[in-house]
Amino acid sequence: MRKPLIAVVMLLAGTAVFAAETPLTAARYAQQLGVGMDVDWARTDRGIREFDPLIVRDFYNAGIRHVRIRVADNMTEARLIHLRKLVEACEEYGVIPVIAYQADTFKADPDAKNEAQLVAWWSTVGHFFGSDHPTLGFDVIYEPADKLNRDLPALNRAYENVVRTLHDIDAQRMIFIAPRLRAAPEDLSSLKLPPHSQNYLLAEWHIFPWGPLKANGKYPWTSGTAAERAAIRARIATALRWQQKSGHATWVGGWAVGESFKSAPTASQMAFARFMACELNKAKIPYAINADSQFYDGEEGAWRPAPEPLLQEMIAPTCEKPDAKPGHHELKAPVRGEQSATPTAASTTQSTARPASSASQG
């Protein structure tokens, strides 16, 4: 009886070693991101005050697999300690953390002084985390806008310096860079990518970060007409073509349905949420939902009931099969209230361990 038992133990040990030695690349990282949510746990006084590690458990149980932790202020020791608390909570409950910097000063005036401040900010964060927390990602500037829209060389130069700085600290750190025009997918091609950076550099882009807002007297989404759907598919196709041409994975850093949710979602909101989520899933592009305060009550420590059906569609939409008749949907298994065991930090780290390397890939 002992020989079969020994064989099983050796097999399990070998599987664990193989998983631990499997390198984490940007392509694998993008697959693991899944559906996420933009959070203000480190950006607003309320978000910082109301954060509790158990919130991350609630997010995981709802089907959220990563969080985009937005940060706006200069870095201090207290803020660094708070960020580590957030990252450790994410690891404990199997949620991937991505730190995203607002970089308002550099966006407003991308001169040499403000670029140096941007590099210094990330250098501080990079040195604080070192090579720990292998699933932690860095989103250099979320939504490049303002004067950066007219100064592409300054944006690319800043990315080059930040990426080099961070990869000198940790050559395998996952880093996101976003194009100008508030991360428009049409401008992905303007990004200047470091050579041989596919393994640790991803592109972040946006589509309807605040929902389909009215522009030039018209809404880009009303009832989901053929033209409205085609316009959204065209933008996603633009990102897919860039992925194929560049060899880099992409991630939608945030999208929303637009209005705040004080009552039950409308039919138009539900249709838009379903279509967006289904199209991004079909394209195999991970995405984050904007934003946590719309759906989760940090003070109560619970999901808001009114937008819950909408959130369900954004996380696990009911999508039409390619060969289905119009109006027929394939119902996915619900994700809210999952009873499966919550991953621990050890299991998460084991499956994403990094290869030994000292050379910068950025």
Image (tube, grey):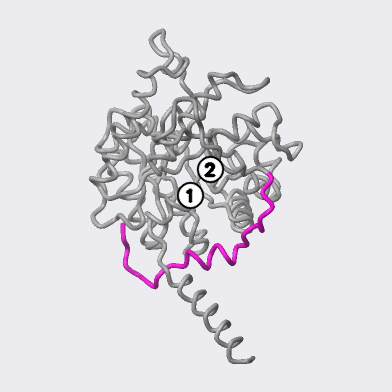
Q: Position of residue 112 (x, y in %)?
A: 32, 40
Give the main secondary structure of the magenta stretch: loop
Locate the N terminus by quadrant.
Answer: bottom right
Q: Which residue occupies 45% across, 14% down?
A: 214
The amino acid on which the numbered mark 1 sits, given as a three-letter code, is Leu
Q: Is residue 166 above or below residue 242?
A: below
Name the foreground residue: 188 vs 49. 188
Magenta stretch encompasses residue 350: yes
Range of magenta residues: 337-362
Q: Which residue occupies 43% across, 55% down?
A: 29
Q: Which mark is residue 33?
A: 1
Q: Are marks 1 and 2 in contact (CB under 8 Å)?
A: yes
- The residue carrying pointer 1 sits among few (fewer than 14), some (14 to 19) or many (20 or more) residues within 10 Å by Cα, namely many
The residue identified by callout 2 is 36
Whether residue 139 is visible to the viewer of this picture, yes or no, is: yes
Q: Position of residue 135 (x, y in %)?
A: 49, 57
The residue tagged with tag 2: helix, strand or loop?
A: strand
Q: Is residue 342 above or below residue 8?
A: above
Magenta stretch encompasses residue 357: yes
Left or right: 252 in relation to 47? left
Q: CA distance from mark 1 to mark 2?
A: 7 Å
Quarter of the figure with residue 316: top right
The residue tagged with tag 1: helix, strand or loop?
A: helix
